[in-house]
Image (tube, coloured by chain):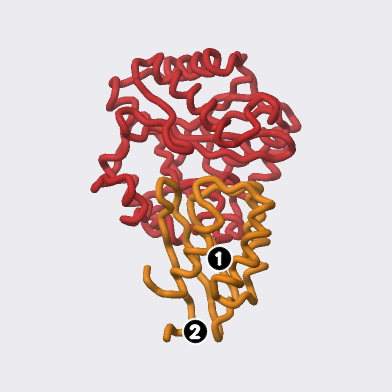
């Protein structure tokens, strides 16, 4: 099994787009806090803080991440990445296959 | 209106934000003194910038209000532009507005004999090599797009200051980061700053039908710039992610 505690980092280059990175603290499989960074564009920019707040407390699995990300990204404009890329980078960090 | 000049990183970013708040159609062409690194809104300062080296070389670091990547603004080898206007003056779709503004800039470079064109989301390239990168934000019903235009390039210095990972360049299929960039001097030799400025104005006139007269910040914009400069100096803002 993969470790469920600790600080996890993920990074991915979106094909033809930008770089997304995530750094998160995970305890018993739940995100305690997370920082998303990279050279993508999101409008309005400060919404990223809202996403990070919503992700704190979320179980680190695809279903729960999607439940938070899908409605969130309906309200913002992303350029250089897709909502799926954000989910993918978090799962990548979880799998520690960077 | 056209404004030009030289400022430090914090003043330069504060003036762009003050202009965005004001929304008066303005083209600003400026340099950075001392040389500086600006990072995108979403980037991590520690992950993108070699801070120890910046301190050693006297390079300022600042976070922008726009997304995108880290940029090295060399005091002599780079000029930055910013364009501010009400949203109605550019296409609604952000990607379309990048295309319009970058095509104007490329048209300006064309006046200098450089065959440049808009590529990807926010780049301008010459023979596949990047000569300019831009970033845009929209607030208060206005648009700010600013970006760098390389005049000469010291890639070795640039990459001593930035932490450039192999992933950043992986899908572009180019082994060396040095092969990805070019500059005005590399393409057509030395260009007088006035000539460059006039060429860029011509590009905006031809593509967007904009004409500019030289001016300066008004009192309100100057006061606003002084106020928001405090944010750009602060550790809280620059190291927030």
Callout 1: few (<14), some (14-19), or many (20+) C-alpha neighbours within 10 Å?
many
Which residue corresponds to the image point at 61% horizontal and 35% vertical from the top-left? B93
Which residue extends farthest left? B175
Tell me which residue sits at (54%, 32%) in the image. B98
Residue A50 position (above or below residue B171): below
Q: Is residue A28 left or right of residue B152?
A: right
Residue that badge 1 annotates: A35
Please identify the quadrant where the N terminus of chain A is shown: bottom left
Q: Is residue A45 visible?
A: yes
- Note the chain letter of the red one: B
Residue that appears at 51% across and 29% down: B99
Per the image, the residue denoted by label 2 is A4
Quarter occupied by residue B50:
bottom left
Q: Quadrant of the C terminus of chain A?
A: bottom left
Horizontally, residue B138 falls left or right of residue A27, namely right
Q: Colour of chain A?
A: orange
Task: Locate residue B55, reporting x and y percent.
Answer: 41, 55
Single out the mark in the foreground, 1 or 2. 2
The x, y position of residue A93, in whole percent, is 45, 71
Asked if residue B11 can be seen in this view, the reply is no
Q: Is residue A43 above or below residue A91?
A: above
User: As displayed, is residue B151 above or below residue A21?
Assistant: above
């Amino acid at each position: 099994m993969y470790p469920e505690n600790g600080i996890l980092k993920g990074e991915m280059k979106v094909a033809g787009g930008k770089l997304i990175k995530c750094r998160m603290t995970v305890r018993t499989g739940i995100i305690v806090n997370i920082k998303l960074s990279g050279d993508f564009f999101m409008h309005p920019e400060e919404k990223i803080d809202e996403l990070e707040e919503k992700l704190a407390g979320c179980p680190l699995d695809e279903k729960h991440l999607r439940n938070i990300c899908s409605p969130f990204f309906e309200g913002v404009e992303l350029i250089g990445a897709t909502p799926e890329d954000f989910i993918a980078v978090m799962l990548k960090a979880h799998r520690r296959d960077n | 209106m056209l404004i030009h000049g030289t400022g430090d990183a914090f003043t330069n970013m504060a003036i762009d934000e003050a202009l965005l708040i004001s929304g008066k159609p303005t083209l600003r062409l400026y340099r950075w003194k001392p040389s500086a690194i600006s990072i995108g809104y979403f980037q991590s300062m520690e992950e993108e910038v070699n801070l120890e080296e910046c301190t050693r070389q006297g390079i300022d670091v600042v976070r922008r209000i726009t997304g995108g990547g880290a940029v090295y603004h060399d005091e002599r080898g780079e000029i930055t532009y910013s364009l501010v206007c009400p949203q109605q003056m550019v296409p609604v779709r952000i990607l379309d507005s990048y295309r319009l503004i970058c095509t104007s800039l490329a048209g300006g470079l064309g006046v200098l004999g450089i065959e440049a064109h808009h590529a990807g989301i926010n780049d301008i390239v010459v023979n596949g090599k990047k000569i300019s990168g831009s970033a845009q934000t929209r607030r208060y019903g206005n648009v700010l797009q600013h970006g760098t235009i390389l005049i000469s390039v010291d890639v070795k210095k640039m990459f001593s200051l930035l932490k450039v990972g192999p992933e950043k360049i992986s899908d572009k299929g180019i082994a060396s980061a040095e092969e990805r960039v070019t500059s005005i001097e590399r393409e057509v030799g030395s260009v007088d700053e006035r000539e460059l400025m006039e060429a860029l104005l011509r590009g905006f006139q031809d593509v967007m039908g904009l004409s500019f007269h030289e001016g300066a910040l008004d009192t309100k914009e100057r006061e606003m710039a002084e106020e928001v400069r405090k944010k750009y100096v602060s550790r809280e803002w620059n190291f927030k992610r």
